Amino acid sequence: MHTFERTARAYEDPAGADWLAADQLSASGIGEFSGQVIPIVGLWGGEGHLRTPDGWRLESRVEEGTVLSCSLIDPNTSTVMTVPLHSITEYRAVSFNPSGRFLLLASTGEVQVMARGRAGER
C-alpha cells in the first residue's frame, strides 16, 4: 500500500460473503491487511471511537442498527450538546476519528465530516 496502489474488493452484495463476519461488524482484511480481522462501522452498524483523547464523548441511542439520536458531552463542564442528524436517510454510525479532531456522521446515503478547532482556536 505504500505505492498508493488502490486495493478493493469487487462490489457485490455482502450477504453470505465469506469475508464478512456473521454479525457484519468485522471483515477479513485484504492486501497488506490479509489475515487480520478489521472492525467495520457503517451500513451494518458497528461502533467507532466514542471518546477523544482529551475526554469529549458521544452517547447515541441506537435501535436495529439505526442511530436515532446522539449527544456530545464536554469533558470540562459536562454540558450535553445534540449532534445534528439532518440527513434524509438513516444514520448508521456516529464516531470520532482516532485523533478526536473530526466527528464522522455516516448515513446510508452520505458521510458528513465535522472538524473542531485546534487548542486555542475558536
Image (cartoon, rainbow, N blue to C red):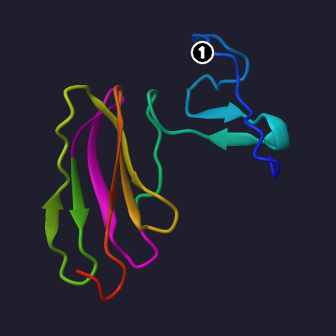
Instruction: Say which of 98 and 113 sits in front.
Output: 113
The residue under the point 19% across, 27% down is: 88
Question: How far from the left and from the top, in percent, is residue 25?
Answer: 56, 34
The quarter of the picture where residue 75 lies is bottom left
Instruction: Say which of 71 and 103 sits in front.
Output: 103
Q: Is residue 66 above or below residue 80?
A: above
Report the side of 37 relative to 24 (left or right): right
Of the residues shown, which amino acid type is indicated by label 1?
A: Pro
Residue that protrudes farthest toward the bottom in the picture: 120
| Dominant secondary structure (helix, strand or loop) of the stretch shown in magenta | strand
The residue under the point 15% across, 62% down is: 81
Q: Which residues are magenta?
A: 52-69
Instruction: Say which of 23 and 10 sits in front.
Output: 10
Q: How many marks?
A: 1
Q: Is residue 83 above or below residue 26?
A: below
The quarter of the picture where residue 111 lies is top left
* Quadrant of the snapshot with the C terminus: bottom left
Q: Is residue 60 above or below residue 22?
A: below
Question: How far from the left and from the top, in percent, is residue 80?
Answer: 15, 66
Q: Is residue 113 above or below residue 90?
A: below
**Secondary element at tag 1:** loop
Report the side of 46 relative to 2 (left or right): left
The quarter of the picture where residue 22 lies is top right
Instruction: Say which of 29 and 78 sits in front.
Output: 29
Question: How far from the left and from the top, in percent, is residue 101?
Answer: 41, 68
**Mark 1: few/some/many CA within 10 Å (<14, 14-19, 20+):** few
Q: Which residue is mark 1?
A: 14
In the rendered structure, does residue 38 fall within the stretch colored magenta?
A: no
